[in-house]
Structure formats: structure tokens, C-alpha cells
Image (cartoon, grey):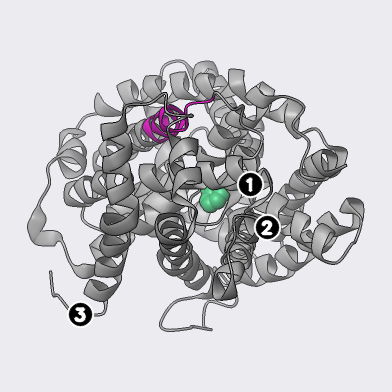
């Protein structure tokens, strides 16, 4: 019974693919370039890579270990492994964070679908860079159109969860994600050969540390959490289906490696193109949407049909990558409502979704008609993005690391991560020190630094 309730993975490979599908999404292609652009380029990339290696990978292993050991979902895993007092609520924090992310994730997912449609009706052809920018602004600030796409993206995500076809989707992404990768590589080739692209490559790859501020550290850490899907217990749930012999380190390194590669390659598409056509790299959430069409239509200028086919396929694949991530965000709240309130899945999922839709509408409108309403100087969309990625995810990660390092039974943890002592003991020892001390201190230091306590 429990097996059926906890998701619909028929196979163990499906669970590993799902974890990869969760990680690879808009975070890589949309959020990474815009955060990099807003935070000064190369230096941000260096900090990002450090965060992935020092915080991201160890934490992913920790979430995998918690999930596989407890064989239950993210919020039950902690009490199952002996969490008492406040530790029992870490799981709830994780559920809440994912839920809040989904509220604005579906907005961007909707934008992606609009671009699939635009590419499909050949609406991207024959325009100037200025047109692409104004088209995007007009679209997101429209009070109706983005909402229709929001409903569509939520409907798709809900449909997959309700019909229990996750397994099929994850399997399909086994073929589709490598295809996305191939497309990205080709686009990198196109973008870096555009006239004037050199400055964009330099912007991404040459670290100028004079641009680093406390906010850059926080942004890099937040992006690592967001892109790797860590700090909200969703990887925990997937790992509860991992086979006993699955190498947790190997899987974490593979997923983080592919995820990071796709992010960097996306940067290598966006920045050269942005410089080539004179778009500000700090353009914010619009960056990818106003830059990409230029790449398609300038690189394939002589072959309009190729530009058409290529852009359509690319946006379709991106929408698919967004869908697998959105599923991973909707599953934990659905499960939580289902198990805590004893409401059937088929009602729990729409309830979880309805709340997202309500908040999502507000986030979407905050890009246009409600732009005047600010919280801490940010519109609602940016506020949700800031609070979840830069505060709640790292907080969830910090608590997970402290729990795993200090509260969880040491023997259980070590046998889990070493696959019953198959992996080298030195590696395990280094890992234990990382998760107990280095990682929590790093997260706390970045928080304190942001508050101006260190002033880096
Ligand atoms: N990692 C996903 C992406 O890159 C987003 C996500 C964040 C999914 C957190 C689950 C949890 O798009």
C-alpha cells in the first residue's frame, strides 16, 4: 500500500532518472544565466562551482542516504530516523519550500510554453533584437495571456501526477534530456561564432573578483540549491526507491556534473549572444527569453526552416525539462496532504495545485499590473524567488546536514553512504567531516556575510 502511495515509480532506474529529471530544468537554462548576469559573470561562476562541490554534492548524498535508509518520503524520513523535538519539523519546512517554489516555477514554465507556441506559429521569425525584448515585456506584463499559460502548465503537471504517468515521463526524459544536451551544444557553437561574441565568453569565463559582494556568495549558494533540487527533501523521496546497491556518491556526482555542465553551456549560449546583439547581461528573468530567439534566427539566418524546426524543438525540450522538475515540486505537498490529512491522492493533488495557482497568479501579475506592490523592494515574483532559493532552501540544507551529521545514528549513516563498506573508508571519513562541520559552517558563514558580519 505504502509503495503505491509514495509515488508511482515502477522501477528503481525510474527513481534515479526522476532525481536527474528534477535537477535538470529551468534552473539550468533560465535561472543560472540570469543570476550569473546579475552577479557579475565569471566570479559568480567560480563561487557557484565551489558551492556545488562543497555544499551541493555532500548534501545530495545526505538526502539520498536519509531517503534510502528511511524508505519513506522527505517529511516522514526525519522522525523515522529518530528525529525528536524541532527536528521533526525539518520535513515540513522542506515541503513548504517546494510548494512556494512551485508557485513561481509554473509561471516561468508557462512562459516556456508560450515560446513553444510562438516558435510553432513561426512568430519568432523576421524580428529584430529590440522586437524580441519588447514582445517578451508585453507578454509577461499582459494581465491575461501569461495566466492562461500558467493554468496550462499547472494542468499538465497535475495531469501527470493524477494519471500516474510519471514513470513514462521519466523514461521518456532518458531520451529527451540527452537530446536537449545535443541541442544545447549545437547552440553553443552557433552563439560563440556570432560577431562580437568574444566579450560574452570573457564575461562568463573570466572571473573579476572585484565584482564579488556578500550578495554574490548568497546568490551562488542559492543557485546551487535551486539547480540541484536540494534542501527541500524531494531527492530524499526519490532515493527511498533507490536500489540497495546504488552508489550514492556516484549518482550525486553524475547528477551534479550533468546539471552543472548544462548550466555552463547555457551560459555559453546566452552571454555571447547577449553581447553580440547588445542585450544587458543583467537583464534579469527575461534574459534567456530575449536572447535565445536571436541565436536561432541569426545563426540559421539563411535557412529559415532550420531556424523554425530548431527553435520549436528546443523550446519543446525545455518545456519537458521544466515539467519533470515541476512534478518533483508538486509531489511532496501532494503526498503531505494525502498522508497527513488522509485525503485521497486524487483530491490531494488538486488541493496542492489550487494553492499554487492562487499564489502563482499573484506572482505572474506582479510582472505587470501589480508591479507597484513591493516587499522589501522586490515584486512578488522576485520576493518568492529570493525567499525560497536564497533563504529557505539553504536553511533546509543546513538543518538536513546538522541532522545527518549530529543526530542520525552514525553507524546507519556510514553503512548507507559506504554501501555496506564497499566504498573506501578515507572517502567516507572526509565526507563525515564535511557534512558535520564544513558544510554547516559554510552555509552559516554565507548567511552571516550577507548580513554584513564579515564584509567579504
Ligand atoms: N532543480 C530544478 C531546476 O533546475 C528546480 C527545483 C528546485 C526542483 C528545487 C525541485 C526542487 O529547474
Q: Are marks 2 and 1 in contact (CB under 8 Å)?
A: yes
Where is mark 2, residue-wise?
Answer: 76
Instruction: Indicate which disc, 1 or 3, sits on the residue closer to the N terminus.
Output: 1
Q: Nearer the viewer, residue 131 or 14?
A: 14
Please tell me whether mark 1 or mark 3 is closer to you in this view.
Answer: 1
Residue 164 at x, y percent in the picture: 83, 37
Q: Is residue 277 visible?
A: no
Cα distance in 3D space between marks 2 and 1: 8 Å
Give the answer, above or below, for where 338 lies relative to 255: below
Residue 257 at x, y percent in the picture: 37, 31
Identified at 57% across, 40% down, the residue is: 22
Residue 325 at x, y percent in the picture: 60, 43
- The kind of secondary structure element at disc 1 is helix
Instruction: Indicate which disc, 2 or 1, sits on the residue closer to the N terminus.
Output: 1
- Is 230 situated left or right of 112 in this image? left
- The kind of secondary structure element at disc 3 is loop
User: Residue 386 sits in which quadrant?
Assistant: bottom left
Please tell me whether mark 2 or mark 1 is closer to you in this view.
Answer: 1
Q: Give the crowd class for mark 2: few <14, some 14-19, many >=20 residues within 10 Å.
A: many
Q: Is mark 3 within 8 Å of ligand 1?
A: no
Q: Main secondary structure of the magenta part?
A: helix
Where is mark 1, residue-wise?
Answer: 70
Amino acid at each position: 500500500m505504502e509503495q503505491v502511495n509514495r509515488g508511482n515509480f515502477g522501477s528503481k532506474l525510474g527513481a534515479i532518472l526522476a532525481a536527474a529529471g528534477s535537477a535538470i530544468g529551468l534552473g539550468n537554462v533560465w535561472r543560472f544565466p540570469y543570476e550569473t548576469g546579475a552577479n557579475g559573470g565569471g566570479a559568480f561562476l567560480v563561487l557557484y562551482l565551489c558551492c556545488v562541490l562543497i555544499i551541493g554534492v555532500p548534501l545530495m548524498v545526505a538526502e539520498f542516504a536519509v531517503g534510502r535508509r528511511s524508505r519513506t518520503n522527505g517529511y516522514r524520513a526525519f522522525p523515522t530516523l529518530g528525529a525528536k523535538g524541532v527536528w521533526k519539523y525539518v520535513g515540513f519546512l522542506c515541503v513548504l519550500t517546494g510548494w512556494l517554489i512551485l508557485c513561481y516555477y509554473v509561471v516561468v514554465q508557462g512562459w516556456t510554453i508560450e515560446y513553444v507556441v510562438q516558435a510553432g506559429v513561426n512568430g519568432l521569425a523576421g524580428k529584430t533584437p529590440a522586437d524580441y525584448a519588447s514582445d517578451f515585456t508585453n507578454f509577461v506584463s499582459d494581465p491575461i495571456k501569461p495566466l492562461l499559460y500558467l493554468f496550462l502548465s499547472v494542468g499538465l503537471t497535475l495531469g501527470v501526477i493524477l494519471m500516474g504517468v510519471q514513470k513514462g515521463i521519466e523514461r521518456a526524459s532518458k531520451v529527451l534530456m540527452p537530446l536537449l544536451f545535443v541541442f544545447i551544444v549545437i547552440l553553443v557553437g552557433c552563439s560563440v561564432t556570432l560577431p562580437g561574441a568574444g566579450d560574452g565568453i570573457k564575461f562568463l569565463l573570466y572571473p573579476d573578483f572585484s565584482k564579488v559582494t556578500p550578495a554574490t556568495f548568497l546568490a551562488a549558494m542559492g543557485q546551487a540549491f535551486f539547480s540541484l533540487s536540494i534542501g527541500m527533501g524531494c531527492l530524499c523521496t526519490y532515493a527511498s526507491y533507490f536500489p540497495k546497491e546504488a552508489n550514492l556518491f556516484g549518482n550525486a556526482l553524475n547528477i551534479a556534473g550533468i546539471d552543472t555542465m548544462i548550466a555552463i553551456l547555457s551560459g555559453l549560449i546566452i552571454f555571447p549572444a547577449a553581447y553580440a546583439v547588445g542585450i544587458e547581461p543583467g537583464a534579469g528573468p527575461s534574459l534567456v527569453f530575449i536572447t535565445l530567439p536571436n541565436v536561432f534566427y541569426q545563426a540559421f539566418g539563411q535557412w529559415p526552416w532550420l531556424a523554425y524546426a530548431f527553435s520549436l524543438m528546443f523550446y519543446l525540450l525545455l518545456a519537458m525539462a521544466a515539467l519533470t522538475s515541476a512534478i518533483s515540486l508538486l509531489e511532496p505537498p501532494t503526498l503531505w496532504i494525502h498522508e497527513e490529512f488522509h485525503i485521497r491522492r486524487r483530491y490531494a493533488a488538486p488541493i496542492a495545485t489550487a494553492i499554487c495557482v492562487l499564489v502563482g497568479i499573484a506572482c505572474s501579475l506582479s510582472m505587470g499590473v501589480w508591479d507597484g506592490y513591493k516587499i522589501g523592494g522586490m515584486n512578488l515574483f522576485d520576493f518568492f524567488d529570493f525567499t525560497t532559493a536564497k533563504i529557505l532552501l539553504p536553511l533546509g540544507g543546513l538543518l538536513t546536514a546538522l541532522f545527518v551529521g549530529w543526530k542520525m545514528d552514525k553507524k546507519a549513516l556510514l553503512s548507507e553512504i559506504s554501501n555496506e563498506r564497499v566504498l573506501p573508508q578515507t572517502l567516507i571519513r572526509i565526507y563525515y567531516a564535511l557534512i558535520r562541520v564544513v558544510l554547516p559552517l559554510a552555509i552559516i558563514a554565507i548567511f552571516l556575510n550577507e548580513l554584513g558580519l564579515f564584509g567579504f
